Amino acid sequence: MADAPDDGIETFAWQCGSAVIKLAWREGNWNEAIRLAGKALDELPTREVSLRWRIQGWLADSLWHQGDVAAARKHWHEVLRNQPAVFRHLGLSLLGLRERRQ
């Protein structure tokens, strides 16, 4: 999505949308979290950097819970490379990754 000037409304809308992803993730609705997070990452403006890393963290964790370790690793690596504090902020752990190697 092209970055147009933000009047605050669009940022607020993305924050609300991320809450829906977070809710699906917290409830263990992995398929819905994956679907919503993937769609959000495709459409999220590049200026929403912090939100992007949080959504990608939820996506990675949801993929891991679904058993798609390879896809989860791809997202985890990107988050770790760009914003490692997301793991602490979301309460995520990479310890389980060692237990589910494929």
Image: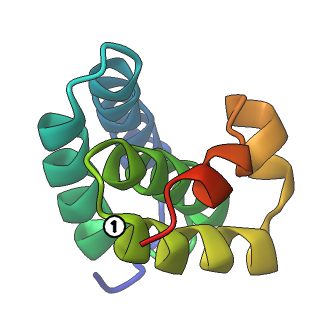
Q: Which residue is mark 1?
A: 41
Badge 1 marks a residue whose secondary structure is: helix
Q: Residues within 10 Å of mark 1 (few under 14, many from 20)?
A: some
Q: Is residue 7 visible?
A: no
> Would residue 29 be found to the left or right of residue 92 on screen?
left
**Amino acid marked by disc 1:** Leu
Tell me the residue at 86%/51% (across/down).
85
Q: Is residue 13 above or below residue 74?
A: above
Q: Is the residue 56 above or below the residue 80 in the image?
A: above
Front one among 94 and 49: 94
Point out residue 24 in the picture as x, y percentages from the top left corner. 27, 24
Q: Which quarter of the figure has residue 71?
A: bottom left
Residue 10 % position (x, y): 36, 48
The residue closer to the viewer here, 95 or 37, is 95
Q: Residue furthest bottom?
A: 2
Question: Which residue is depicted at the point 30% across and 21% down?
Answer: 28
